[in-house]
Amino acid sequence: MDLAPTPEMRALRTEVRSWLEANLPWAYGEGLPPRFATLEEEVAFGRDWQRRLAEAGWVGVTWPTAYGGRSLGPAANFVVQEELARARAPELVGRIGINLAGPTLLAHGTETQKARWLPAVLPARELWCQLFSEPDAGSDLASVRTSARPADGGWELRGTKVWTSYAQFADWGICLARTDPDAPRHRGLSFFVVDMHAPGVEVRPLVQVTGEAEFNEVVLDGVAVPDDQLIGEPGQGWAVAGSTLSHERGVNPRQLVIHLQHLEELLRTAATTGAFDDERLRRRLAQAYVEVRLFQLHNWRSLSRLERGLEPGPEGSALKLYWSEMSKRLHALALDVLGPAAPLWQGAEDNPGDGSWQRAWLYYQASSIFAGTNEIQRNVLAERVLGLPRG
Ligand SMILES: Cc1cc2nc3c(=O)[nH]c(=O)nc-3n(C[C@H](O)[C@H](O)[C@H](O)COP(=O)(O)OP(=O)(O)OC[C@H]3O[C@@H](n4cnc5c(N)ncnc54)[C@H](O)[C@@H]3O)c2cc1C
């Protein structure tokens, strides 16, 4: 593909960069976002930042203009994401709505459903969560047991979801539930939008190894879901959820932004800890630089498929596999760069990054689990790319 930017892309880059230079909540390009005392504070800050960014038209640029986007192509989205990385802008708190729920509703929702939910997504007026995984349905998602029984004017949902990121802040959840227990398992599922404030929804935070409780167990105890919150037809849930998952595993501007930022920050940190004087660390830093750059190029390659109107395809699995393993190496290197400060935590003296590297190392242990484990990605590549027999 031709990587030379078009005049339109160059103009877009200049425009978003100028906006960020004038509007970032701290000096352009300086340091990672501040640490917050609590997740609540971080989410409140994130909502305000996303609102301001959306008002300027820099959130969801590929979305139709009717719902707050700019109706631009995937390459334009990449340009914006790269500029956000360059500026060290904060991550978007409404990312599940922007990247998963929104695109699923755009593809499968009725006009009424789109008009009802989509306008509140980009400015973070309403936040979303993903109610797919259950205690016995993760990799094997078709084993979902949460039931949806016909009830007056709609459905009654009963079951337990788990690992639901940001459920405690969410207004709505996209939910996979079983409407026909007698149908073959993939055909008995339906896709709902659940009001997270409805009676019967209980959100129980789960504390992670980082000490934060970003994800939750969600109990649905007879939750009434009106008929107009069913997405697609009853029994079509598997196909609708497939569309959500393809957005989760395909090209990944979000992880690209994070890793471009982390690489840059690591190189700055290495310059202060004397790591460049150690030949072994110097080599690994060079290797990390090459790997993040390769990740960027992998993304651009997938992007060229999207620009031609093709689906991401199984190469999305190669991308997920690559970035998650790269991420673990990058964050392990960061701890080696910290040297004797590696075991310290937030608030300790002489701890470059004030615990953010230690937290990132812990957090990215999960990168080979979320959005489909790496074993599952390998299965996809073996069966659908290499044509090996099914396991
Ligand atoms: C940080 C984080 C955030 C998450 N956020 C959400 C969220 O917001 N919403 C949501 O719905 N879910 C979320 N998840 C859940 C995530 O999608 C699941 O953890 C993941 O799909 C794996 O499922 P599981 O945990 O049940 O593991 P299991 O499926 O039980 O797998 C256990 C182990 O067995 C392996 N295994 C399973 N089947 C096979 C096979 N066929 N071949 C080879 N190996 C296999 C797996 O690779 C894994 O190593 C999140 C997870 C994490 C870690």
Image: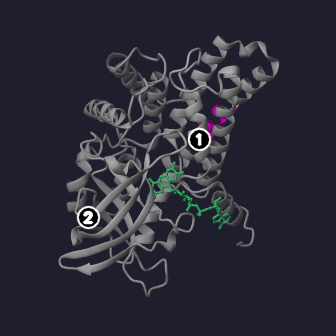
Measured as percent of width and height from the top left, residue 6 is found at 48, 30
Q: Is residue 95 left or right of residue 44?
A: right
Q: How is the image coloured?
A: one colour
Residue labelled with disc 1: 364
Q: Residue at x 38, y 54 (%)?
A: 204
174 relative to 238, above or below: above
Q: Nearer the viewer, residue 101 or 134?
A: 134
* Residue 110 x, y percent position in the rendering: 26, 64
Look at the numbered disc 2 and give the secondary structure of its residue.
loop
Q: Which residues are magenta?
A: 291-299
Q: Residue at x 20, y 55 (%)?
A: 116
The verdict on label 1 being within 8 Å of ligand 1 is no
Q: Can you tell which mark lies on residue 110?
A: 2
Of mark 2 and mark 1, the one earlier in the sequence is: 2
Residue 162: x %, y % from top left: 45, 59
183 over 3 or under it: above or below: below
What residue sits 20% from the left and 61% below the top? Answer: 112
Quadrant of the rendering where the C terminus is positioned: bottom right
What type is the residue that disc 2 sits on? Thr
195 vs 37, left or right, is: left
Q: Is residue 320 magenta?
A: no
How packed is label 1: few (under 14 Cα within 10 Å), some, or many (20 or more)? some
Q: Secondary structure at mark 1?
A: helix
For residue 8, above or below residue 178: above
| Residue 320 shows in the view | yes
Split into 4 quadrants, where in the image is the N terminus? top right
Residue at horizontal 37 percent and vertical 39 percent from the top: 93
Q: Please identify the residue farthest to the bottom as the structure is shown.
A: 182
Whether the residue carrying mark 2 lies under 8 Å from ligand 1 is answered with: no
Q: How much space separates mark 2 and mark 1, taking CA atoms?
A: 37 Å
Name the chief secondary structure element in magenta: helix
